[in-house]
Image: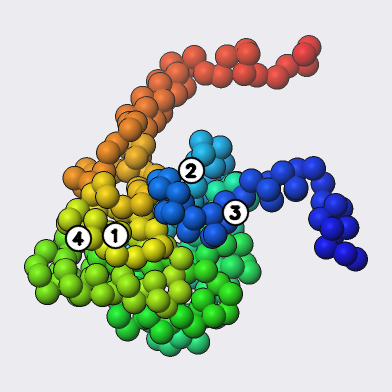
Amino acid sequence: MSLLAFLGCCSGNCKQSAMNKIRVPDIVGRKKDKQKLVMLTSYDAITARIVDEAGVDIILIGDSLGNVIQGHDTTLPVRLEDMIYHTRLVSRGAKTAHICADMPFMSYQCSKEQALQNAGRLMKEGLAESVKLETTEQYLETVEYIVSAGIPVMGHIGLCPQSYHAMGGYKIQGRDKKEKNRYIKLAKATESAGAYCIVLEGIPLELAKEITKSISIPTIGIGAGPHCDGQVLVINDLVGLHTGGVPKFVKQYADFRKLMTKAVKSFSSDVVKSRFPGEENSFSWSN
Ligand code: KIV
């Protein structure tokens, strides 16, 4: 069957979504066109659907799900199986946004072969379209190895939450001259290793600006100031669905926790006072 005939046999919907789909070259091209990239995390199908329909460019299934979904203090306990499961849910909900899945702690650290195998599982079983890994110097070869197998890789430098214990907590990185030079060099090396874009997390805005100017792939910032080529936030922080406060770099746009608490209290009170269910919520033999 010719390629054209194959494409022609897709249903209207299929063609539509394939045409609108945001792909890796579109993401890279945004930097040249000076168009900001918008990335948000999602972990389930309904949230992914909402985020996708609102026009977000990239949905990240972040290992932050360890904190905001699983209730851990760090991302370290997140398993590859968890990431595959949540990535599959998100890929069912999103039609247009690019879908990037985080490689969790210990899924790429042991060897480049282990990393490629696990990146492959996120693509095959989770239906991810690219993977992200926390990119310190020792993983540059791993990035190159995964990319050479045809899997796009998003880098992540600066504050790397999987190094929580080594960093002594979540601390802003790249504050002194030595660190600054290290991160500029690392960003360039991550680009040379084949990454299609880089998340810059928890670094001074001046450093993020310099990195953004010195590489040709897009930077996506979180706690890295306004000069990056795009921005990302954890969806729970954005909508106020969390149990504690949010860090300084977050802008909270809604208070879902307050709304949910109000809804749950109203439901409880209606049940206790026999106001729910009413006739309109019930079935009877007559209708
Ligand atoms: O895990 C995550 O959600 C992330 C983003 C905060 C960049 O890595």
Q: What amino acid does circle 4 point to?
A: Leu
Percent position (x, y) of residue 155?
39, 68
SS label for mark 3:
helix
Residue beneath disc 2: 56
Mark 3 residue's CB less than 8 Å from ligand 1: no
Q: Is residue 179 left or right of residue 88?
A: left
What whole-number distance in Å separates the C-alpha atoms at marks 1 and 2? Answer: 24 Å
What whole-number distance in Å separates the C-alpha atoms at marks 4 and 2? Answer: 26 Å
What whole-number distance in Å separates the C-alpha atoms at marks 2 and 3? Answer: 14 Å
| For marks 3 and 4 on the same chain, the one whose residue lies earlier in the sequence | 3
Image depth: mark 4 or mark 2 in front: 4
- Residue sitting at x 80%, y 42%: 12
10 Å neighbourhood of mark 2: few (<14), some, or many (≥20)? some
Q: Are marks 1 and 2 in contact (CB under 8 Å)?
A: no
Q: Which residue is farthest front?
A: 32
Q: Is residue 190 above or below residue 51?
A: below
- Residue sitting at x 45%, y 18%: 270
Image depth: mark 3 or mark 1 in front: 1
Q: Is residue 22 above or below residue 115?
A: above
Residue beneath disc 3: 91
Residue beneath disc 4: 207
